Image: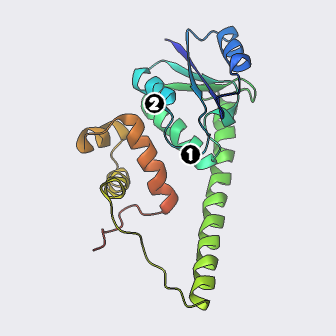
Amino acid sequence: MASLGYARVSTVEQNADLQTRALKDAGCQKVYTDHGVSGTKAKRPQLDKLLEHARAGDELVVWKLDRLGRNTRQLLDLIDHLESEGVHFRSLTEGIATTGPMGKAMLTVMSAFAQLERDQLAERTKAGMAAAAARGRKGGRPAVTPETEKVRQAGQYRHAGLNPPEIAKLLGLSRATVYRYLSLSAAEGNYGAPPHA
């Protein structure tokens, strides 16, 4: 079993030494660090590389939960992905580990907040569309690009019960990209939505 650390700083000027030191002190054999990458961005090269190298029985360790993702849904999707691969997760600051019952209970609470987040987003979207309609603007879905089509397909496959590695093989994508697409698909609530012309 390998302990793999992940550190991230939002700007190139910031220093990840505090995180790196804490991760090494916690027993991480290797630390992957993204510099100048916001937590809201789905593409994080070093995290993608870590996910490619992680194997069943390994552990992904972060200094703090927000280093892994700013968005609760994004964070839970990633932890779900790790669990499906047999990779454990641990956050040093919050003391959460997916191997213990307390950590799993915390993740359940976070999952409830993620659902609340999704519901509020849906309400804001409806209110925004109603306001736009009142101003005479018509809503509509953006044109389908090759990427949005892959996002839709990934959501459909997940909805059908396939796991991320199976989806990656079907779509010819990396597991990290599939995770990102599933996160986008869940945020848009378009699992199983038919393509439009």
Q: Position of residue 149 (x, y in %)?
A: 31, 58
Residue at 51% of width from left, 29% of height from top? 47
Image quadrant containing the C terminus: bottom left
Residue 133 in the figure: left or right of residue 144: right
Q: Mark 1 highlights which residue?
A: 74
Q: What amino acid type should be assigned to the residue bearing mark 1?
A: Gln
The colour scheme of the drawn protein is rainbow
Q: Is residue 157 above or below residue 68?
A: below
Residue at 31% of width from left, 43% of height from top? 167
Proximity of marks 1 and 2: CB atoms separated by less than 8 Å: no
The disc, 1 or 2, on the residue closer to the chain's N-terminal end is: 2
Q: Is residue 74 above or below residue 52?
A: below
Residue 10 in the figure: left or right of residue 87: right
Residue 93 in the figure: left or right of residue 27: right
Q: Mark 2 highlights which residue?
A: 48
Q: What amino acid type should be assigned to the residue bearing mark 2?
A: Asp
Residue at 56% of width from left, 87% of height from top? 133
How packed mark 2 is, by other alpha carbons closer than 10 Å (few <14, some 14-19, many 20 or more), is some
Asked which quadrant contains residue 160, the reply is bottom left
Q: Position of residue 126 (x, y in %)?
A: 59, 77
Q: Can the viewer see residue 111? A: yes
Q: Nearer the viewer, residue 112 or 172?
A: 172
Q: Can the viewer see residue 86? A: no
Q: Position of residue 157 (x, y in %)?
A: 32, 52
Residue 141 in the figure: left or right of residue 61: left
Q: Nearer the viewer, residue 108 or 28?
A: 28
Disc number placed over residue 185 in the picture, else none: none
Residue at 41% of width from left, 48% of height from top? 181
